[in-house]
Image (cartoon, rainbow, N blue to C red):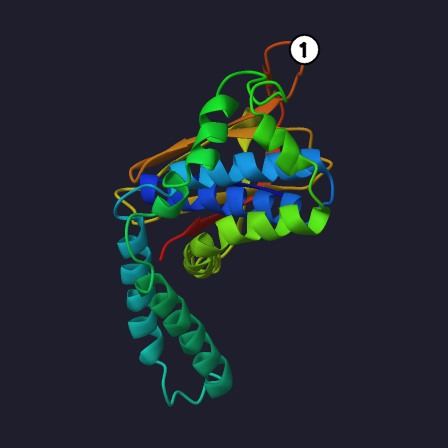
Amino acid sequence: MITYEYPFNERIRTLLRLEDLFDKVAYFVQQDGTREHHVALLTLFEILEVASRADLKMDLIQELERQRQSLLVFRNNPDISEEALSGALYEIEQSSAALLAMTGKMGQYLRENEWLMGIRSRAAIPGGVCEFDVPSYHYWQHQSVEARRAALNTWLKPFMPLRGGLDIVLRLLRASGRPEKQIAAGGAFQLMLGGSGAQMVRVSLKPQVDFVPEISANKYALNIRFTCPDYDHRPRHADTDVEFSMVFCNL
């Protein structure tokens, strides 16, 4: 299945963006090439930009505490595995403690690194980090794979409590709903939500279905328009019924 996620608010949108960036940087750091490590560094700068929201850390801490309190209700419930419950509570408590241990402004240690900030400003210019622009960066790229990877992991490590917290929150969010089969008659689907508390909708289609959902939604209404992707021209509206699965997620 190909799943498309659509967040209903800026808070979840930020977490999804960060999740995508953390997945990318983790992949490129593990590669050996200088070009891959260049992409990893640029992705780190994107994480710094997105994570700079002043209330992001406290948002995660408060949400983790809310989830912890919700799980405590299931203590001594014969229908719930005590081992699984204890494991989930321990994971949440460890993540909260790691977030609380983060001090100062998010990513301040990167902002205080003049060399990295120089690369960041040059990277905003197309072709701005050529060897004649930043010779010291050209030198860094010629260091051993191990040295470059160690540097990248050092710069990334202070962000990892953030990743741990958002991973837990998004995992709980995705597991909160049940999929329902739907049909978009003539490629269009509309549903009135009546002020629903949903925070995200997940739309899944079989890989062989040649349609892409264009989703617009708020707490009052959901609209999905299925189109046929055309990479040379404007996408065409689907002219047949489209079967899909939909899940509303809410913490």
| Image x and y of residue 148, in percent | 64, 46
Q: Which residue is identified by label 1?
A: 232
Residue closest to the eye, 120 or 180: 120
Residue at 58%, 31% (x, y): give it: 136
Looking at the image, residue 85 sits to the left or right of residue 105; the answer is: right
Residue closest to the eye, 225 or 54: 54
Question: Eyeballing the image, is 70 above or below 240?
Answer: below
Residue 170 visible somewhere in the drawing: no
Residue 125 visible somewhere in the drawing: yes
Residue 201 figure quarter: top left
Residue at 37%, 73% (x, y): give it: 93
Residue 41 figure quarter: top right
Secondary structure category for the residue under label 1: loop
Residue 195 figure quarter: top left
Residue closest to the eye, 228 or 161: 161
Q: Which amino acid does label 1 sit on?
A: Asp
Residue closest to the eye, 211 or 186: 211
| Image x and y of residue 97, in percent | 35, 69
Residue at 33%, 39% (x, y): give it: 10
Image quadrant where one finds the C terminus: bottom left
| Image x and y of residue 67, in percent | 34, 67
Question: Eyeballing the image, is 208 above or below 102?
Answer: above
| Image x and y of residue 46, in percent | 46, 36
Count the labels in the image: 1
Image quadrant where one finds the N terminus: top right
Crowding around mark 1 (Cα neighbors within 10 Å: few <14, some 14 to 19, many 20+) is few
